[in-house]
Amino acid sequence: MNSTNNPTLKQELSTLVEIVESTAAWLPGVSAPHQGLHEKSGVADFVTSHDIEMQRQLEAALSAAFPAASFLGEEDEAQNPDTLRQALAGTDGLFIVDPIDGTSNFVYGYKHSSVSVALVRGGEPVLAVVHNPWLSETFAAAKGHGSFCKDPHTTRPCRPSSVPLNRAVILYGSTPYQRDLIAPGYRLLQTLHEQGRDMRRSGSAALDLSYIADGRGDLFFELRLQAWDYAAGLLICREAGAVVTDAFGNVPVLPRASSIIAGNPLTQPGALDVIRELGIDEAVRISEQAT
């Protein structure tokens, strides 16, 4: 099915935005974000009872509205790879969900986290929503229909910046769960920072990608992200006119973990050149082969 100018997608996106916004409305009122806190895979990888409850509510609401679609959430147990491949390739779709992207921010009361939901059909994301309930701000996209930013006052199209790399504000993720990539990431950050204007580390990759789509930053990179971290932001960036690849210049393949390099049409290719010059691509390759 060709999604370009498909009115059904726009209707489905409206439904998805409503589900995510209404389901996430309780998060800013949580008085004990540490509740049920435990580490998953390492010292920097948190989950709380709120992550699990948010995922449960989203799965119930999405299943009611899209009964044929499958569901993959960050807090799920490992799923059968064959089942995932079938769901990804099919027309019924697979929802890839991060119930709270930026759990560390949430636990620390930093108020910069998001709910990220993407619907993948035929191997491609076709619907995406990233919602920050603390700012009542939503970024959304439907394949072939562009992306937009919505807050209580206005709804407007997203557009990336046109700033070159030597004047770029760089958003980055520090791969806290992939310790072997921390040093290469800092080498890349230092070089880009020295060449550019400034840098930011926000703690929510879904919001960072949305900000690239909306021109609030000029380049984003993280050398390893899981599918639920980047699936929605990937489509939001693409539909806005931003460029997203992995560290090798390839299109990220869902639902695999991937390096993510996102920027406007000036900064993104330049960042790939720097990655090759520094040998960061080789560090990413070695890390991927080891895990």
Image: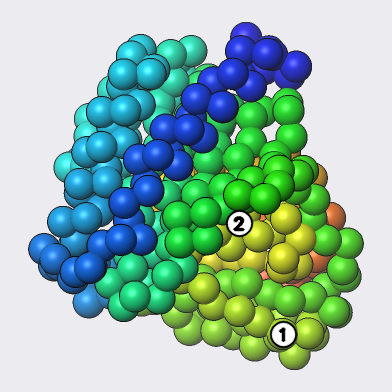
Residue, x 52% and y 54% (percent of image)? 136
Up the image or down, 230 lies above or below 43; here it is: above
Q: Which residue is mark 1?
A: 198
Q: Quadrant of residue 11?
A: top right
Q: Amino acid at mark 2?
A: Leu
Residue 148 relative to residue 134: left or right:
right
Up the image or down, 87 lies above or below 281; here it is: above
- Whole-percent x and y of residue 113? 43, 62
- Whole-percent x and y of residue 210? 62, 54
Up the image or down, 249 lies above or below 38; here it is: above
Residue 135 relative to residue 177: left or right:
right
> Sequence-wise, which precedes: disc 1 or disc 2?
1
**Between 289 and 8, which is closer to the camera in this rendering?**
8
- Whole-percent x and y of residue 89? 46, 19
| Residue furthest front as drawn | 153
**Between 289 and 109, which is closer to the camera in this rendering?**
109
Q: Which residue is mark 2?
A: 209
Residue, x 61% and y 56% (percent of image)? 209
Quadrant location of the N terminus in the rendered image: top right
